[in-house]
């Protein structure tokens, strides 16, 4: 199971998405922005964790001739707890951005794409309480503030109880 943390307005309308952040994201072009500036901060409730090695950004670009790019880039959690691209993953994404811009320039009307982040959740102990809540914030400029995207959402709005109960225990 992949738990997507979409960065550009993919979340369901029934979730408490911050409208100011949504507008900021809608005006940010992920092909032109430096991916080194992006960071995701996820506040998980007690009982939920991130399965090691599963946090990633994803970039997908489709052209009339088929997929142009379908790539994932591992995220690393820094000392502040935020998830960021680093090292080779950052270099690969920057190179793929250049390719994506070339594809878009060649056929602006026929090229489409998506950009998002995700991870596979796991459980600690008995898992989260039934009324557990989570928040997601994004940083889109270097050294900028984290913008609240999803604030204090009930965990069951993101993951129905049957999916939470099916999660694997977190490895140490």
Image (tube, grey):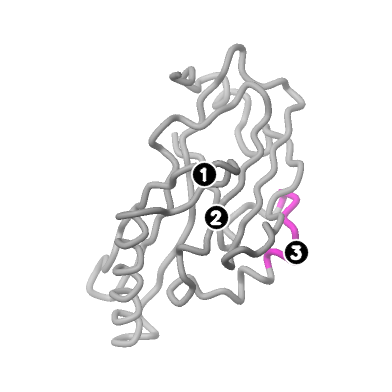
Which of the two labelled residues, at mark 2 and mark 1, occupies the earlier sequence position? 2
The answer to which quarter of the image holds residue 13 is bottom right
Tags 2 and 1 touching, CB below 8 Å: yes
Measured Cα–Cα span from mark 2 to mark 1: 10 Å
Q: Residue at x 55, y 55 (%)?
A: 39
Task: Rate crowding at label 3 as few (under 14), some (14 to 19) or many (20 or more) other CA atoms within 10 Å.
Answer: few
The answer to which quarter of the image holds residue 71 is bottom left
Count the numbered circles shown: 3
Look at the image and give the residue range highlighted in magenta: 14-22
Q: Residue at x 61, y 53 (%)?
A: 11
Q: Residue at x 60, y 43 (%)?
A: 80
Describe residue 48's horizontal placement relative to residue 3 as left or right: right
Please identify the quadrant where the C terminus is shown: top left
Q: Label 1: state its secondary structure.
A: loop
Describe residue 30's horizontal placement relative to residue 93 as left or right: right
Q: Residue at x 51, y 44 (%)?
A: 78
Describe residue 162's horizontal placement relative to residue 171 as left or right: right
Task: Select label 2 or label 1 by which is in front.
Answer: 1
């Amino acid at each position: 199971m992949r738990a997507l943390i979409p960065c550009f307005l993919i979340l369901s309308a029934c979730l408490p998405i911050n409208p100011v952040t949504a507008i900021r994201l809608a005006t940010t072009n992920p092909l032109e922005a430096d991916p080194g500036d992006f960071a995701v901060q996820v506040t998980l409730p007690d009982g939920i964790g991130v399965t090691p090695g599963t946090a990633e950004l994803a970039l997908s670009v489709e052209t009339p001739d088929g997929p142009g790019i379908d790539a994932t880039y591992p995220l690393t959690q820094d000392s502040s707890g935020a998830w960021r691209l680093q090292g080779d993953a950052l270099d690969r994404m920057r190179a793929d951005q250049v390719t994506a811009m070339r594809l878009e320039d060649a056929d602006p009307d026929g090229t489409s794409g998506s950009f998002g982040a995700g991870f596979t959740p796991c459980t600690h102990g008995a898992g989260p309480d039934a009324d557990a809540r989570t928040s997601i914030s994004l940083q889109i400029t270097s050294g900028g503030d984290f913008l609240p995207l999803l604030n204090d959402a009930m965990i069951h709005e993101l993951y129905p109880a049957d999916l939470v109960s099916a999660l694997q225990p977190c490895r140490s």
